[in-house]
Image: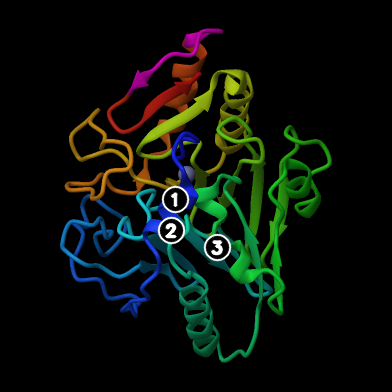
């Protein structure tokens, strides 16, 4: 999420980075496996000082990374997906820390396990708000790394999307062909990514367990994007919607205050696929009059 009225740069300054060496896949609290697809609970600022980033390995080639709320109150999630030819990093965090050492370490360990010495990296974005692109500069110009631009035209050009936003593109990581679905609305360059390996739909800030901010003038664009994503994914077996923040508590309909310093009793990251249809139906019923719509595990939140 992001509300433009808050100053991201200010947050970054306030939380000047102190690099804690992250115990990479060894956070301490086990998640309830009946309630989450992840082995560990996500760091949520509730247990004193915590690592700046937490990495969970979902499968051999899929990593999910959370930036600590103690480094930036947005506490976004990043995704790192490996194919045989290249890896894709979705998002570079909200600032207030260096993320590349953590990403480089994951890549180095993955390469070592595969008996390889290199793989190219594409740095793409769920969308271009500041809490998802702040670490781009750490990757710009690095060997074997391509950083996708922030404007819709740059995203379309990179993924070879001829008609933005109506066309849906394929992007092959090598034995792992992602689909790139343009979803402008929350932000003009927003995309969702379908991954056939995990059957996840990376849904960015367009749909996650939190406040889905959409400016009034972008409402129709957002509604079309949700329709597009729903139509494309309907025949696919989506396991989970994987967003880029958590702002809901485990109590239905109750979210945290904006920019809360910690997230006690936090909702899990993943949402069931049915929430996409729930959102679609909700938007359809609004007609041309977007309104605040509080669901059990997400909130549609129009902004003037
Ligand atoms: Zn965000």
The residue tagged 3 is 135
Q: What is the x, y in percent for residue 289? A: 51, 8
Q: Is residue 291 left or right of residue 248?
A: right
Quadrant position of the N terminus in the picture: top left
**Are there few (<14), some (14-19), or many (20+) residues within 10 Å of tag 1?**
few
Q: Which of 304 and 230 lies nearest the eye of the viewer?
A: 304
The residue lying toward the viewer, choosing from 109 and 132, is 132
Q: Secondary structure at mark 3?
A: loop
Question: How busy is the neighbourhood of tag 3: few (under 14 within 10 Å), some, or many (20 plus)?
Answer: many
Mark 1–mark 2 Cα distance, whole angstroms, equals 5 Å
Q: Nearer the viewer, residue 170 or 53?
A: 53
- Mark closer to the chain start, 3 or 2: 2
The residue at the point 49 percent across, 87 percent down is 113
Compared with 140, 183 (above or below) is: above
Front-most of residues 49 and 255: 49
Residue under circle 2?
13
Q: Is residue 200 visible?
A: no
Residue at (17, 48) in percent of width and height: 264
Q: Eyeballing the image, is 256 above or below 160?
A: above
Magenta residues span 286-294
């Amino acid at each position: 999420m992001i509300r433009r009225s808050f100053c991201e740069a200010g947050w970054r300054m306030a939380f000047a980075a102190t690099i804690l060496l992250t115990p990479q896949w060894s956070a301490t609290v086990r998640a309830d496996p009946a309630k989450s697809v992840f082995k560990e609970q996500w760091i949520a600022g509730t247990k004193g000082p915590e690592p700046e980033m937490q990495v969970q390995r979902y499968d051999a080639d899929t990593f999910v990374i959370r930036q600590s709320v103690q480094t930036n109150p947005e506490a976004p999630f990043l995704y790192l997906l490996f194919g045989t030819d290249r890896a894709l990093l979705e998002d570079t965090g909200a600032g207030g820390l260096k993320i590349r050492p953590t990403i480089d370490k994951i890549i180095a360990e993955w390469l070592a396990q595969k008996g390889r010495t290199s793989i190219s990296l594409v740095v793409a974005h769920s969308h271009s708000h500041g809490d998802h692109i702040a670490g781009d500069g750490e990757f710009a110009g690095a060997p074997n790394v391509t950083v996708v631009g922030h404007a819709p035209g740059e995203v379309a050009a990179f993924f070879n999307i001829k008609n933005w936003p109506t066309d849906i593109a394929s992007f092959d990581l090598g034995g792992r062909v992602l689909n790139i679905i343009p979803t402008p609305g929350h932000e003009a360059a927003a995309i969702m990514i379908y991954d056939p390996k995990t059957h996840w739909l990376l849904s960015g800030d367009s749909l996650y367990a939190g406040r889905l901010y959409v400016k009034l003038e972008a409402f129709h664009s957002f509604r079309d994007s949700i329709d597009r994503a729903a139509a494309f994914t309907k025949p696919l077996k989506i396991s989970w919607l994987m967003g880029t923040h958590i702002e809901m508590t485990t109590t239905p309909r109750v979210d945290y205050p904006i920019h809360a310093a910690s997230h006690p009793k936090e909702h899990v990251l993943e949402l069931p696929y049915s929430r996409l249809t729930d959102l679609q139906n909700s938007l359809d019923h609004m007609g041309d009059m977007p309104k605040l719509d509080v669901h059990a595990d997400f909130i549609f939140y129009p902004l003037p």
